[in-house]
Amino acid sequence: MSFLDDGWSTGHGGGGPTRNRPHGNLAALRVAVVVMFAILIAQLFRMQIIQGDEYARRSRENHITQQIKLAPRGLITDRNGEPLVENVPVYTAIILPELLPETRDERYKIYLRLEQLIGVPALEIDSMVKTQEIDGRGYINVPVRKYLTQNQALRLEEASADLKGVRLDVSPGRRYPAGNEFSAMLGFIGPQTKEEHAQLTSKGYQLNEPVGKAGIESYYETDLRGAPGATAAEQDAQGRLVQALKSKDPVPGNGVQLAIDSGLQRFVTELLYDHMAGDRVNGDASVAAAVVMNAKTGEIYSLVSIPDYDNNVFVEPEKRAAEINALNHDEAQKPLLNKALNPAAPGSTFKLITASAGLETGRVTPATSRFIPKVLEVKGENGVLYPLIDWKAHGNINFTQAIAWSSNIYMFMISCGILGESRGLGKDDETSAVVLGYYARQFGLGRLTGIDVGGEAPGIIPDPAWKKRVHAGEGRDSTDWHYADTCFMGIGQGDVTATPLQIARMTAAVANGGKLLTPHVAKAIVGADGQVVRTIEPDWTQVAVSDRNLAEVRKGMHESVIGGAGARAYQPGLDIAGKTGTAEFNLPDGTLAQHAWFTGYAPFDDPEVVVTVYFDRGIGGDKAAPLGGQILSYFFAEVKKP
């Protein structure tokens, strides 16, 4: 009996083989199963051993991708809600090298198509991608061209489905429609530098995320930025979407409402531009600035810097590189510097500090009067007589009149001690300078104001130690503190410098009884839903001068506009107090020129607003004072309407 017969026997009847069983079919089935397993084993061998690397690559390509979606920046508006910036889309053509075809020919077809769509040469695209891959960064997007036009973006979006590894990226950008008069204040946004990115990565910034570069855009970057969102999706080897997995929406940035009044800002800018040209008395100005500030809170209603510039050139830096380069290298006018925050010799506006120091130290009283000639000769240490010059022979004047008519020699008497005085504010020249410097710093000079714009300079309040340090190595005559240094410091000349904003802040402190306010351009931070997140509250320190003494200084300022050196600031129906300033300085060719200043406030008996005007050429009483009065008139007529 065969093996197969034994295997198919039954326990019934005669015990022989069953004749109806399909012996041949069973054998074929067994052979088929063996063949199928052999094929499966061969296929597995081919996939894992022969083509293992290829399928591993495909597995990697068919992967989960995450795309960061940048948040729209918060808007910036003026105090009345007028938008000063706009959010606009920035379109960028992107290539992800690891999703490109393997063959050079297939890749080059894509590059040629991109050249047709966006104008970037195929060879240039090839170089960009190769550089990225050589650096081992094939997994990072290559921005082929940024700032595509809307038409280019639409064409690329339509074609990208057939361009493996290519996509259109849309990110938030900025436009500045308000005008050049807001440029120095608003600043602009721009791409991160390598140094910035190294610092911002830890804060969650993406490499392609713009950042505030100057002005409000920079100072309030944290508020304006918002929080990026993200989408996760599965893509196939061709970069096509397989399925969306999850997403997190970006959170728009908070808005910043400024205290600035747009109408006032435009009025002041136009007014200054209209008066840049000189006349037979005043030289042609190339730089001007103005500050309009709340005398009680420090809110800035207007902050003007001339020359200004178009901050929209920074919206498309690649396209407008020549304009940006011209702005950066204009050494004559330096338009990117905010002139309201950069220093110059303050001239006679500084006399408000000298006068306050004289009263507070008891060196003079409101009744102190002297006969003031036009020239007074003073004997120096070497016995030589040096002339101290006033701008006119004032005759017999008291403290109030000395401020009203801006007497140099009267202020010399306070600062360095002349007209029969044995000394000035201290026991000698050097201590007098130190005392005067103390009061100058009390009024905020020589240090930053803390304004929320950025880019300000502290100015200089000199003293003997400063002179030795700064002029070290230049010889004894340059490092020693001289009698004349103290005298000229008292009238805001010599090495003294201050910014228009510092002078406005000083004026507010005189006007409001001694509160040295921290100026602020922003009024409130506003959420995307329109609700106020926080308000910018007034902040100040107290000046070490009594209000009784400041009241005497205010009287002199009042008399100046009523019928003194600042009379051209007078405006019908307004009770203005003010102080002019004309600071002499030498031009590179040795000729003498003057800075023109006016600083004042109104109303005299209840100060609400301070105005400071500066021109780099001119006479304070002739050029700056009339404009100060006109700005105050506009303010009460149009900004603070009855």
Image (spheres, grey):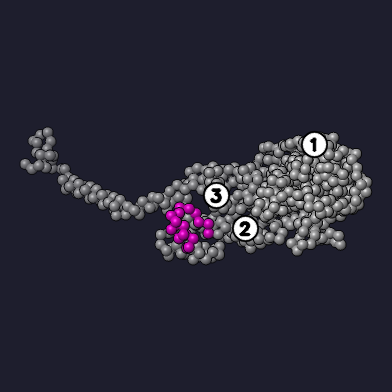
Earlier in the chain: of badge 2 and badge 1, it is: 2
Reading the image, the residue beneath label 2 is: 316
Residue drawn at x 85%, y 46% is 418
Q: Residue furthest front?
A: 383
Residue drawn at x 81%, y 37% is 361
Reading the image, the residue beneath label 1 is: 545
Q: Residues within 10 Å of mark 3 (few under 14, many from 20)?
A: some
Q: Is residue 292 visible?
A: no
Labels in figure, total = 3
Reading the image, the residue beneath label 3 is: 197
Earlier in the chain: of badge 1 and badge 3, it is: 3
Give the mark toward the camera: 2 or 3: 3
Q: Is residue 256 magenta?
A: no
Helix, strand or loop at label 3? It is: helix
The amino acid type, in three-letter code, at marker 3 is His
Q: Quadrant of the N terminus?
A: top left
Q: CA distance from mark 1 to mark 3?
A: 47 Å
The x, y position of residue 580, in whole percent, is: 84, 49
Helix, strand or loop at label 1? It is: loop
Helix, strand or loop at label 2? It is: loop
Q: Are marks 1 and 3 in contact (CB under 8 Å)?
A: no
Location of residue 118 with respect to 524 vertically, above or below: below
Task: Choose between 552 and 36: the one closer to the eye.
Answer: 552
Residue drawn at x 56%, y 56% is 92
The amino acid type, in three-letter code, at marker 1 is Val
The amino acid type, in three-letter code, at marker 2 is Glu
Q: Which residues are magenta?
A: 126-144
